[in-house]
Image (cartoon, grey):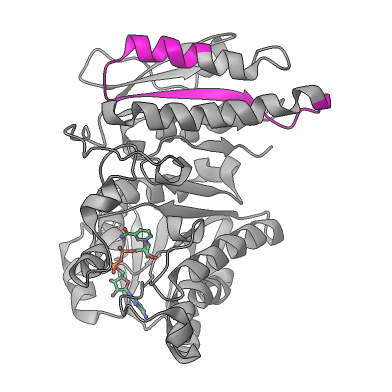
Amino acid sequence: MQTVLITGAASGIGRDTAQLFAESGWQCVLVDRNAEALQQLGRSLPPPASAAHVLRTIDLTSQEQIASLGEGTPALDAILNNAGMSDSSNTPLAEQDYAQLERLLALNLAAPAAVVNACAPLLKRGARIVNVASGAGLHAIPWRGAYSPSKAGLIAQTKALAQARPDWCVTVLAPGFVRTELLDGLIQAGRLDPVNAVSKIPLGRMASPAEMAQAHFFLASAGARPLSGQILAVNGGSSIFGGSQRFAPTALAPLPLDLPTGLEVLGGDTMPWEAVAPRPSAEPHYPATLDLSPLYSKPGHVLQAVHAAGSRFSAAHTEKASLTVLLPAGTALPWQDAGDTAAARMLVSTLACEWGARALRINALEVPPNLPPSSLRALLRFVCGPAAQFLTGQSLVCGAE
Ligand code: NAI
């Protein structure tokens, strides 16, 4: 049995995440300051096979209370630092006193580090730590107090921790808009116009908390190892979009997140990849293509290979499917070819924007030479499959073993 600690578990993304882990047989250590909602959640979850879920009522803005987490908590396979708050006061930053900023920074930036420190002795070998930042950490969102700075800080802290502790797998999830209590609060306070927000998302919709739970579940697994030190931006493509046009709300509902994936592998030496990929299925399935051709293309021809892969895929699928391309990473190129892979990455993002209305997704995995395909099994399953239906336009750099 594996054990996960989830902060901010009592509502929104945290609650759906707890549900998914518990249904999958994990023991959950659920942390929140809302005792009543925590008890209610604890009663609703299926119990683990042995032991029981652990409920901890803790205010994560208090370093003393966080320090107490070390006592009475079982050994952990993963920590999800999910709790966070936004600022719906509408007070301009320069008119806030530092104490107002401090409370938000304490929860969003200081608490994740303090939780890791308090639980470090409990972490099992190869443990996973997932911090929850936001697209707001990548682009400034004004009139939300220190929200953007706190999340930018958390992204940097994640990368630093991944470097400092290569024995752990440390990643940061950057969700886009997710329909949770936090978001509803911003809408009610007039701080967010949902129609305007959706018009900047290539997939034309917000995410459900269940979709973020799936991302958490993958990042908390041992298979997330190749992504240590990286951001996983699950935002419907909003962070890669820089145009001025508006996207229409989609009429396409996502497919069930647990549908089997029917994956076809194309473009090169497919055998070692087919061995790790989910098999094509005659049952109702989520269609997915893994195109290897950019990985095997001649230096300077990666962009061309991605374009050909995109054209093939677009002609073969009308809606609701994914294309994942593999790009070469970490190879020394003459300077004349140095723009090729960057151009290919941006082509992936541009195609994602153009395909969003059809719920066609495209993502790239950058693969260093000699990385065994088997080390990408879980990553491929997640990125290609229906659990990642809000992930598009991203290039993920896979670390060497
Ligand atoms: P939520 O407001 O629905 O849930 C947050 C949970 O954290 C609540 O159960 C709350 O009681 C708990 N919490 C708040 N302050 C606490 C404290 N001082 N001590 C202990 N627990 C505390 O939030 P949501 O939407 O589920 O967000 C989860 C994470 O995702 C946050 O870090 C948020 O910044 C991030 N996020 C959310 C997005 C969204 O659209 N909902 C978008 C991007 C990031």
Residue 351's quadrant in the figure?
Answer: top left
Q: Residue furthest front?
A: 244
Residue 359 drawn at (x, y percent) = 29, 29
| Residue 303 shown left or right of residue 300 in the figure | left
Residue 298's quadrant in the figure?
Answer: top right
How many numbered marks, from 0 up? 0
Screen quadrant of the C terminus? top right
Residue range highlighted in magenta: 308-335
Looking at the picture, tell me which residue is in the foreground, 284 or 350. Answer: 350
Residue 401 seen: no
Residue 110 drawn at (x, y percent) = 53, 77
Task: Residue at 27%, 47% (x, y): give it.
Answer: 198
Residue 56 seen: yes
Task: Residue at 51%, 11% (x, y): give it.
Answer: 308
Q: Is residue 312 magenta?
A: yes
Q: Residue furthest right?
A: 334
| Residue 282 shown left or right of residue 166 in the figure | left
